[in-house]
Structure formats: structure tokens, C-alpha cells
Image (spheres, rainbow, N blue to C red):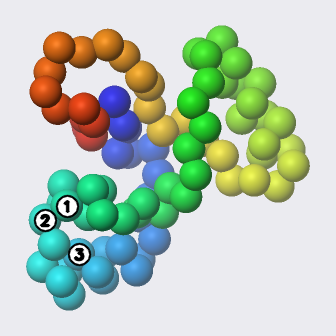
């Protein structure tokens, strides 16, 4: 589950969406929308990893969680 409010899209992605008339879901399917790279960690390690990454000059944040689901939809963006 991805928390869409955890980061702000760089303006170029807003422009691409508008200029290309691209649906919101398709933007996430096609582009990284400013996220870059994702690291999946056990929940107890998140705060430690974020502190380490940010202390070393990276702009790191928690984007969401992984949880089991019976849904056919693999990625949920809220």
C-alpha cells in the first residue's frame, strides 16, 4: 500500500500528466513520479534506516507498507 501523500510530485510529472492527458493511475504505472528508488525493510528497521540515509545526504522517507491481500490489485495507492 503506497501512501500518495508521503511525497510531492516534481512539477515535470504534473506537466507530463496534463500535456499527455495521462490518467492518474497510468502515471504511477509508467513513471516513478519522483520516488526514485524503493528499499523494502522489516517494519522495526524503518526508523533506523531512514535516520542513516538522511544523515548521509539522502532524501529518504517512508512511502508505504507491504501487507497480504486477497485482492487481484497488486498495488494500492491511497
Residue identified by numbered label 2:
23
Q: Residue reaching furthest right?
A: 56
Marks 2 and 3, the one that precedes in the sequence: 3
How packed mark 3 is, by other alpha carbons closer than 10 Å (few <14, some 14-19, many 20 or more), is: some
**Towards the viewer: 13 or 6:** 13
Please give the residue where the numbered disc 1 appears in the rendered image: 26
Q: Mark 2–mark 3 contact, CB under 8 Å?
A: no
- Label 2, label 1: how far apart the Cα atoms are: 5 Å
Disc 1 residue crowd, few under 14, some 14–19, many 20+, Cα 10 Å: few
Query: Is 45 on the left-hand or right-hand side of 52?
Result: left
Instruction: Using the image, tell me which numbered label, if any, was put on residue 18.
Output: none
Q: Are marks 2 and 1 in contact (CB under 8 Å)?
A: yes
Label 1 sits on a secondary structure element that is helix
Q: Quadrant of the C terminus?
A: top left
Local secondary structure at mark 2: loop
What is the x, y in percent for residue 1? 34, 30
Of pointers 1 and 3, the one earlier in the residue sequence: 3
Q: Image quadrant of residue 74?
A: top left
Location of residue 69 in the rendering, given as x and y in whole percent from the top left corner: 24, 15
> In screen coordinates, is 26 left or right of 7?
left
User: Disc 3 designates what residue?
Assistant: 17
What is the number of callouts on the image?
Answer: 3
Residue at 30% x, 56% y: name it.
28
Q: Residues within 10 Å of mark 2 (few under 14, many from 20)?
A: few
* 6 lies left or right of 58: left
Q: Which one is in front in this view, the residue at disc 1 or the one at disc 3? A: 1
Residue 76's quadrant in the figure?
Answer: top left
Compared to residue 69, the image places residue 62 above or below, namely: below
Q: Residue at x 82, y 55 (%)?
A: 57
Mark 3 falls on what kind of element? helix
Give the distance between the C-alpha atoms of the residues marked 2 and 3, in whole angstroms: 7 Å
The percent position of residue 52, horizontal first and vertical second, equals 83, 36
Amino acid at each position: 500500500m503506497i501512501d500518495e501523500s508521503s511525497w510531492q510530485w516534481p512539477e515535470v510529472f504534473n506537466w507530463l500528466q496534463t500535456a499527455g492527458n495521462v490518467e492518474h493511475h497510468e502515471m504511477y504505472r509508467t513513471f516513478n513520479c519522483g520516488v526514485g528508488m524503493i528499499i523494502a525493510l522489516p517494519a522495526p528497521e524503518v526508523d533506523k534506516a531512514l535516520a542513516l540515509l538522511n544523515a548521509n545526504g539522502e532524501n529518504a522517507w517512508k512511502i508505504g507498507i507491504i501487507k497480504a491481500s486477497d485482492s487481484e490489485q497488486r498495488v494500492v495507492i491511497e
